């Protein structure tokens, strides 16, 4: 399978704080991988590095077979990378409809906006009811739906999702993961960062366990799920 996203010996830091220390991984076409780890392990930092929000101290990132180099976040978005950051990443001052319009316009395709909107509102009827409401005034769960709807209206090649279950009720967590499973079965390559270890491992093909900025364990999700005591040792709890 072709690699769509990868990192080699990646180091990321905030001034003197070395948050990510020598991490290597790959995401192949059509695959779903999870990066799991405790608070402060460096998960969000890796995602920021991948979407060029922060510059690596050293190491290499490649996207669709090419080194990331000096490419900008907006350029990566146009090339097919969608990063749903921790805390949703919707535009609070815009309405639901305007948020979807912006997502749609990033990488125009042949379908007209109205036609593209229909399956999205079928999938997330709540968003249809609230299409003229400002995103900033949606509930946390509704904002997460809107964030995922951005990936539905303009499917990216590679989707990076940072903690889709954070702050959601069990019902909403299920809905978010159903949406992700839909992306997965459509052939999208998905990289998921989670503290909700069980949910993440059930969805992902493979996973990497991050501890204090380093990958301490990796393998097929089924293998990791069958070793709860190992996960416990690295994560404190396996959820
Ligand atoms: N802007 C920043 N400036 C300085 N240090 C930072 C900054 N952002 C993160 N850090 C530090 O980098 C380390 C990794 O943080 P990161 O946000 O990547 O963790 P995480 O695995 O996503 O944690 P969580 O599960 O709590 O979201 C932490 O020690 C954190 O305090
Ligand atoms: Mg985080």
Image: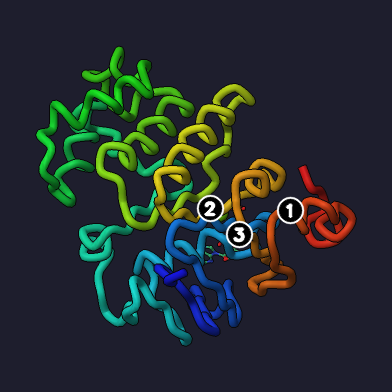
| Residue under the point 53% across and 52% down | 192
Quadrant location of residue 19? bottom right
Which residue corresponds to the image point at 45% horizontal and 56% vertical from the top-left?
A: 30
Report the residue that reaches farthest toward the top: 129
Along the line of sight, which residue is nearer the eye, 202 or 9? 202
Is residue 1 visible in this depiction of the protein?
Answer: yes
Residue sticking out furthest to the front:
1
Kindly identify which numbered label has been placed on residue 35.
3
Residue 73: where, in percent of width, then height? Answer: 28, 64
At label 2, counting other C-alpha atoms closer than 10 Å, the crowd grade (few under 14, some 14-19, many 20 or more) is many
Residue named by callout 2: 192
Farthest residue to the bottom: give it. 58
Crowding at mark 3 (Cα within 10 Å: few <14, some 14-19, many 20+): many
Quadrant containing ligand 2: bottom right
Is 26 placed left or right of 82 in the picture? right
User: Disc 1 versus disc 2: distance between alpha carbons?
Assistant: 16 Å
Label 1 CB sits under 8 Å from any ligand 1 atom = no
User: Which residue lies under the disc numbered 1?
Assistant: 222
Residue 61 lies left or right of residue 225; in this view the side is: left
Marks 3 and 1, the one that precedes in the sequence:
3
Residue 26 picture location, percent across and down: 52, 71
Which residue is rendered at x = 44% and y = 33% of the image? 144
In this view, 58 is above or below 176: below
Q: Name the foreground residue: 205 vs 117.
A: 205
Q: Is mark 3 within 8 Å of ligand 1?
A: no
Q: How far is the residue under mark 2 from the one under mark 3?
A: 6 Å
């Amino acid at each position: 399978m072709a690699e769509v996203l990868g990192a080699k010996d990646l180091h990321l830091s905030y001034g003197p704080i070395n948050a990510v220390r020598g991490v290597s991984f790959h995401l192949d076409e059509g695959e779903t991988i999870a990066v799991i780890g405790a608070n402060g392990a460096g998960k969000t930092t890796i995602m920021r590095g991948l979407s060029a929000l922060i510059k690596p101290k050293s190491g290499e990132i490649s996207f669709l077979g090419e080194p990331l180099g000096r490419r900008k976040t907006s350029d990566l978005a146009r090339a097919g990378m969608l990063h749903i950051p921790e805390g949703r990443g919707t535009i609070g001052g815009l309405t639901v409809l305007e948020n979807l319009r912006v997502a749609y316009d990033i990488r125009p395709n042949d379908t007209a906006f109205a036609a593209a909107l229909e399956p999205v509102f079928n999938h997330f009827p709540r968003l249809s009811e609230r299409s003229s409401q400002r995103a900033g005034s949606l509930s946390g769960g509704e904002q997460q739906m809107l964030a995922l709807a951005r990936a539905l209206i303009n499917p990216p090649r590679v989707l990076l999702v940072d903690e889709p279950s954070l702050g959601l009720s069990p019902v909403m967590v299920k809905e978010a993961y159903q949406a992700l499973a839909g992306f997965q079965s459509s052939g999208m390559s998905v990289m998921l960062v989670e503290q909700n270890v069980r949910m993440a491992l059930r969805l992902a093909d493979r996973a990497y366990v991050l501890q204090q900025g380093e990958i301490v364990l990796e393998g097929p999700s089924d293998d990791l799920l069958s070793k709860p005591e190992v996960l416990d040792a690295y994560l404190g709890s396996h959820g």
